[in-house]
Image (spheres, helix red, strand yellow):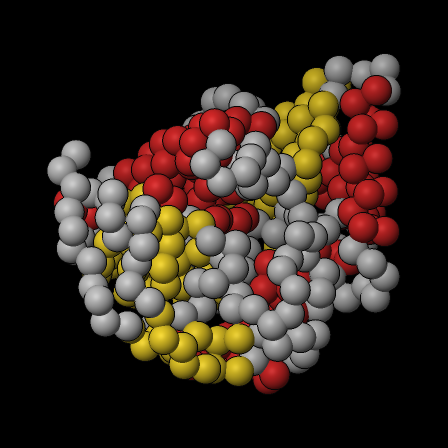
């Protein structure tokens, strides 16, 4: 690729939303910061869309494993346009809409990122629609196809089927030809039925019996985001060769203990089930697994896998196989209200909560 010296010698003023410590959403602080010109291998991205995910709710409580020390800027992913690049970066990237998985830093109007971490968004896909599929689409696609390897004709159980990850996962599973049973609040059942899901109320005291009625022999795969009693139930609902994929411990969000005291028992439980004399399999999905250190061979392989999978998911969106599910939109400066909605039991919309700088 042709390289460019299209760097900028002037600074850019970015608005960022800072998480100063373990605070309520109202404690988030918008600040302004001068960004320097991009250095070697970097790109300056003007953010068009970012979002609220479960991670931010956990981080503000200090309960996301591996989060940075306070204060920091949250924001697990973003979509934006490349406005400047540093030495060694292809000039063709300038002006392109890109997506990035950041873990933190996305709640800003502009960011400096390694150009190697950017994935181009296909023409015809808007920034908000693309944003719904970065962390959520990658998580759903990789759990379904890389972890559980779900096949046409199989039956899968998705807990939290109306959530950010769940609403993508059920669409991908249906596209793969799987039958989908999804747990969700009753207010979301009609929308889930439109997606081809057989919904079950997660608050039903006879939840296990209801799912057993739908899948008497058990499900081929279960995807659980709650942990605790829910992950045990999901495992029991597998058929004799089923696969369980756990990907969060949302049930422990409000716990006050150190996060490892909830996380390690879950990993031990999954490992124990794999050593049990059955043909079932259980695993924990981590979107950052295998990332390695920056500039390592592992990091390059991780980037290649991420780019391949996300590009495929974007293609499904462009082709109409997937529908972007947007629960609500807020200006970036109203991130506190967006986070409050994400954590509210009164939330009525299905999908992702978007922040628009």
Front-lying residue, 18 or 76: 18
204 is higher (above) or lower (below) than 48: above
Quarter of the figure with the N terminus:
top left
Quarter of the figure with the C terminus:
bottom left
338 is higher (above) or lower (below) than 165: below
Name which residue lies at 23% across and 71% down.
10
Front-lying residue, 95 or 132: 95
In which quadrant of the rendered view does residue 355 lie? bottom left
Say how many tags the image has.
Answer: 0
In the displayed structure image, the side of residue 283 where residue 195 appears, left or right:
left
Name which residue lies at 45% across and 68% down.
107
**Residue 133 position in % (x across, y down):** 40, 49
Name which residue lies at 35% across and 42% down.
116
Name which residue lies at 61% across and 40% down.
286
**Residue 349 position in % (x across, y down):** 49, 66
In the displayed structure image, the side of residue 319 where residue 174 appears, left or right:
right
Front-lying residue, 327 or 137: 137
302 is higher (above) or lower (below) than 206: above
**Residue 119 position in % (x across, y down):** 32, 44
Q: Is residue 22 visible?
A: yes
10 is higher (above) or lower (below) than 319: below
In which quadrant of the rendered view does residue 339 lie? bottom right
In the displayed structure image, the side of residue 165 where residue 99 appears, left or right:
left
């Amino acid at each position: 690729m042709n390289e460019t010296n299209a760097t900028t010698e002037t600074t850019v003023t970015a608005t960022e939303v800072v998480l100063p410590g373990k605070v309520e959403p109202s404690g988030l602080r918008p600040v302004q910061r001068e960004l320097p010109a991009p250095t070697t291998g970097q790109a300056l991205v003007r953010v068009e869309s970012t979002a609220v995910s479960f991670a931010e709710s956990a981080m503000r409580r200090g309960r996301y494993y591996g989060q940075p020390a306070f204060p920091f800027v949250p924001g697990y992913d973003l979509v934006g346009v490349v406005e400047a690049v540093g030495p060694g970066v292809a000039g063709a990237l300038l002006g392109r809409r890109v997506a990035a998985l950041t873990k933190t830093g996305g709640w800003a109007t502009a960011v400096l990122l390694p150009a190697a971490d950017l994935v181009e968004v296909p023409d015809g896909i808007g920034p908000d629609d693309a944003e719904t599929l970065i962390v959520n689409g990658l998580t759903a696609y990789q759990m379904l196809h890389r972890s559980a390897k779900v096949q046409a004709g199989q039956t899968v159980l998705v807990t939290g089927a109306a959530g950010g990850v769940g609403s993508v996962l059920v669409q991908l599973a249906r596209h793969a030809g799987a039958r989908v049973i999804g747990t969700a609040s009753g207010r979301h059942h009609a929308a889930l039925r439109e997606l081809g899901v057989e919904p079950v109320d997660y608050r039903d005291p006879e939840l296990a019996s209801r799912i057993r009625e739908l899948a008497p022999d058990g499900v081929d795969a279960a995807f659980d985001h709650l942990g605790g009693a829910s992950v045990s139930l999901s495992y029991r609902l597998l058929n004799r060769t089923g696969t369980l994929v756990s990907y969060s411990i949302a049930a422990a969000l409000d716990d006050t203990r150190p996060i490892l005291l909830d996380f390690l028992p879950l990993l031990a439980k999954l490992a124990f089930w794999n050593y049990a004399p059955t043909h079932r399999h259980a695993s924990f999905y981590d979107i950052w697994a295998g990332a390695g250190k920056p500039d390592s061979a592992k990091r390059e392989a991780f980037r290649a896998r991420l780019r391949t999978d996300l590009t495929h998911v974007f293609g499904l969106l462009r082709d109409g196989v997937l529908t972007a599910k947007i629960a609500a939109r807020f200006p970036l400066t109203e991130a506190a209200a967006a986070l409050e909605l994400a954590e509210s039991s009164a939330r009525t919309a299905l999908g992702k909560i978007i922040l628009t700088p």
